[in-house]
């Protein structure tokens, strides 16, 4: 039988511009951007990030994923030279790679401080939760290069804040502060810069207290029904609700409620 080979087998052998921190005791995995001082994201790194999300999604010991960065800035964006050198076929994959947090079945948190530009912003937009601070600046500056966002930035942003505000951000390459992002609904939390890590830890603990099965179901349902008509969304919600009714976690949740104790969910 022919030996099958796949580039993914070796693609994660040496991570480019980031590392992963994981402790099975806390069920949390951190993807840490680590190319100081601005954590520029290379073309190669984007594909590695996709595979990393897929690997963590397949790991039953991981319940919550955090994307954060070393230093003062989350990311100033992508490697500009890499766009010129990459083939059209490779560039066409960018949005798919950057969307990997959204496809991941587990909750994903982006901890944003400092610059969060270009692909750094797009990667954060693909996460489920974004925590911003008073140092955070969000931007899609591609117009300054004669380009447009190419990894889902304008599309995701328009879903969140509408076409008017998205045009204001994209067409003017406008920078949005963390507080304004929170007011507009882009950031889900806004905290003092010194509190970013503790706020992230707190959200992780909160998410871990819920049923992992219910969390996965809620995320997929919300993603799948984002563009669905109301009648379809309600129908799918009902079907998922019915399916969870027969789960061990739902039974445990009901019993814990009546016994006035904390539920011990197992994800089944």
Image (tube, grey):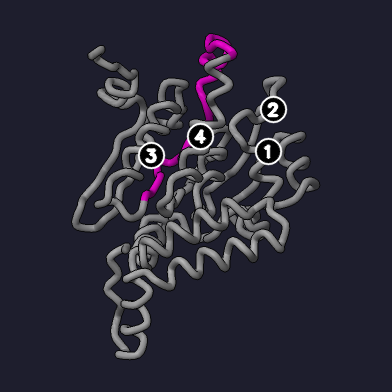
On screen, residue 105 above or below 148: below
Quick one: label 2 or label 3, which is nearer the N terminus? Answer: 3
Judge whether residue 79 is colored magenta: yes
> Residue reaching furthest front?
1
Rate crowding at label 4 as few (under 14), some (14 to 19) or many (20 or more) other CA atoms within 10 Å.
many
Residue stretch in magenta? 65-88
Label 2, label 3: how many angstroms apart (C-alpha)? Answer: 26 Å
Quick one: label 3 or label 4, which is nearer the N terminus? Answer: 3
Seen in the image, is 133 located left or right of residue 213? right
Tag 1 residue: 154
On screen, residue 9 above or below 26: above
* Label pair 2/1, CB-CB below 8 angstroms: yes
Residue drawn at (32%, 55%) of the image:
63
The secondary element bearing badge 4 is classed as helix
Tag 4 residue: 98
Quick one: label 2 or label 4, which is nearer the N terminus? Answer: 4
Label 2, label 4: how many angstroms apart (C-alpha)? Answer: 15 Å
Q: Position of residue 39 (x, y in %)?
A: 43, 31
Q: Which mark is residue 53?
A: 3
Quick one: label 4 or label 1, which is nearer the N terminus? Answer: 4
Label 1, label 3: how many angstroms apart (C-alpha)? Answer: 22 Å
The secondary element bearing badge 1 is classed as helix
């Amino acid at each position: 039988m022919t030996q099958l080979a796949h580039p993914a087998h070796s693609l994660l052998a040496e991570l480019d511009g980031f590392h992963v921190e994981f402790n099975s005791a806390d069920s949390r995995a951190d993807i840490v951007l680590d190319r100081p001082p601005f954590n520029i994201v290379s073309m190669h790194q984007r594909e590695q990030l996709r595979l990393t999300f897929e690997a963590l999604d397949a790991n039953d010991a991981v319940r919550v994923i955090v994307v954060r960065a070393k230093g003062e800035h989350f990311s100033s964006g992508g490697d500009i030279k890499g766009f010129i050198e990459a083939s059209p076929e490779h560039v066409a994959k960018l949005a798919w790679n950057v969307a990997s947090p959204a496809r991941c079945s587990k909750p994903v948190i982006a901890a944003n401080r400092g610059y969060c530009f270009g692909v750094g912003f797009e990667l954060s937009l693909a996460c489920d939760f974004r925590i911003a601070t008073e140092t955070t600046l969000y931007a899609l500056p591609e117009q300054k290069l004669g380009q447009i966002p190419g990894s889902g930035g304008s599309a995701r942003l328009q879903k969140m804040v509408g076409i008017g505000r998205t045009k204001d951000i994209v067409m003017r390459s406008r920078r949005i502060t963390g507080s304004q992002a929170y007011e507009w609904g882009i950031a889900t939390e806004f905290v003092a810069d010194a509190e970013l890590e503790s706020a992230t830890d707190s959200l992780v603990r909160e998410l871990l207290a819920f049923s992992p099965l219910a969390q996965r179901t809620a995320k997929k349902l919300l993603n799948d029904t984002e563009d669905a008509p109301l009648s379809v969304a309600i129908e799918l919600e009902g079907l998922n609700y019915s399916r969870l009714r027969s789960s061990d976690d739902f039974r445990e949740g009901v019993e814990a409620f009546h016994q006035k104790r904390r539920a011990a969910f197992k994800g089944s």
